[in-house]
Image (spheres, rainbow, N blue to C red):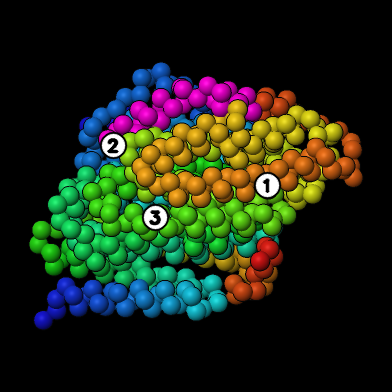
Amino acid sequence: MNFLLLLPEISVAILAGCIIIIDLFVPERFKRSFPYVSITGLSLIVVFYIFSGLPSSPSFLQNVIVVDHFTSFFRILFLLLGIGVLFASGEFVEKHIDKKGEYYALILIAVLATMLMAGARELLTAFLAIELLSFSLYVLVSITRTDQRSNESGMKYIILGVLSSALFLFGISYVYGLLGTTIFDDIAQATINAPVNLGLLFGITLIIVGFGFKVAAVPFHMWAPDVYEGAPLPTTALLAALAKAAVFALFIRVFVTAFGPSISSWQTIILIIAGLTMTLGNLVALTQSNIKRLMAYSSIGQSGYMLMGIAAFSHLTISGLIFHISGYALSTIAAFFTIIVYHNQTGHEEITDYAGLAKRSPFLAISLMASLFSLAGLPFFVGFATKFYFFTAVAAEGFLWLVSLAILNSVISLYYYLQIVRQMYIEPGTETAPLMIGPTPRIVLGFLAIAITVLGIYPRFLVAGAELAARTFF
Amino acid sequence: MLELQHVLILSASLMALGVYGVLARRNAILILMSIELILTAVNLNLLAFAYFVPSNNLTGQIFALFVITIAAAEIGLAMAIILRVFKNRGTSQINELNTLRN
């Protein structure tokens, strides 16, 4: 057994542990350096991981965890997203959160959990990884302890989160009981010839319900707007980008490797959920006035697009889905980064508060515009490339009606993204004093905006990675 | 004679009760108790499947151990958050918590 394959996970765990312990002993003024310590740690892990040549092994740890191209791709993506969230946290945490050590350690633990989710190959491991992620998110959502909105959203999140885990487990217990195994490959073996009976369908449906809760798919989306709005902003970014990408990574792994052979029994369920999710998410987003709530509904709509990929199920759609997830996560991090920087300066989070931002800070306005256009799927941004590739792949599988619905929804989504852009560029603002943005946010945000544009014009590198990751399954 | 289907019927009714409790109750603590019922049903299922089906291995029993631990941790965390809400707001009725829109 070669534990070096788990080195990235082990290093992140050690880093998180170190931060918790150091937090106990150092005085408050040194805690300012925690984000930089965590960022340096994660960056070193990414760099060493890439230079170690991404080792992979077909079987490992009694098939509990697998390290293949899919795992490697998502490990790198999640580490990078974690670095993005940590960069976005610094100033916000300084101002609003009194438990700094716990905050950074929990973010690192969330990154660790997402990496384990990408590698899980067995239902118990998958469940434990999901719970590790959820536990850190429950605390991160309610970490501003005296803020009533944060408390309230934390309570709503944990109650619905625990309920979804319980239903997920009930589904797992049926799958285990009827097939006698929890390892994905063995589940696939057991269902390859036998027809799916009612009990197994019940189990699979409950597993879909559990995943549906975690990715905020309609009709299990009701927690998302409240939690996104009440949570501290960097946590919202973590939920929207990292957590969603990670749950989809596990969703892909479970439904492609374990339930792939029984696709005819669950395909319709996911198709219907996908259609409902994208339509409702985008339509309700039209009426929102708070930018966090708007981003919540927009991310619900995005979940709907992503679910199409799981239902359509082919090499091309899965690689398109992986590509789309990375593009979406990158654009979301960039959008939230600007929202956080703006909030740090002004304390506002209503859409009308963005009036006149183009005059106050052209840099913030143009980066927010780039990331929103990327989320809407306008050309020259990564969102266009991912949507084009992904929707074409789904259409090639014969789901033209669903793709038409998705394109219609993209048009609807353009309307509410443009509302923000209109506020920034056309509406005159009440305040006109220029905003002072520090060098760190400027550099990181500039980098993210350039990445969104460059990957939109020249996506070949990312597509190649996504195809390599998807080839693991086909 | 106790057989697999008896246990499954018991666990299914426990789960139905739990889901009903989550939907019908408005107090956060009672909702948590209802979720505990679902988790009990899960454990019963896992143990019954591991015991009655000879070809199944020990995974079910190990799984049940993990579920018990996770459930305890979950309830501890949920109680901490509910306590915090109660201190700030003086209530743990979820229908009275409506600071966030809708």
Q: Amino acid at mark 3?
A: Ile
Q: Chain of mark 3?
A: A
Quadrant location of the N terminus of chain B in the rendered image: bottom left
Tell me, yes or no, whether the two marked residues, 1 and 3, touch with CB atoms within 8 Å: no
- Mark 1 on the same chain as mark 3: yes
Left of A49 or right of it: where is A31? right
Residue A289 at what x, y percent from top left? 73, 54
Q: Main secondary structure of the magenta part?
A: helix
| Mark 2 surroundings within 10 Å by alpha-carbon count, few (fewer than 14), some (14 through 19), many (20 or more) | some
When the figure is inspected, residue B64 is found, relative to residue A357, above or below; the finding is: below
Stretch of the chain drawn in magenta: A449-474
Frontmost residue, A189 versus B84: A189
* Any part of residue A20 in sight: no
Which residue corresponds to mark 1? A415
Task: Identify the image quadrant of the C terminus of chain B.
Answer: bottom right
Mark 3 — residue?
A: A270
The answer, for residue A474, to whether it is visible in the render is yes
Counting from the top left corner in percent of width and height, residue A436 is at 81, 31
Sequence-wise, which precedes: disc 2 or disc 1? 1
Whole-angstrom CA distance, mark 2 to mark 1, is 37 Å
Residue at image position (23%, 73%) is B8
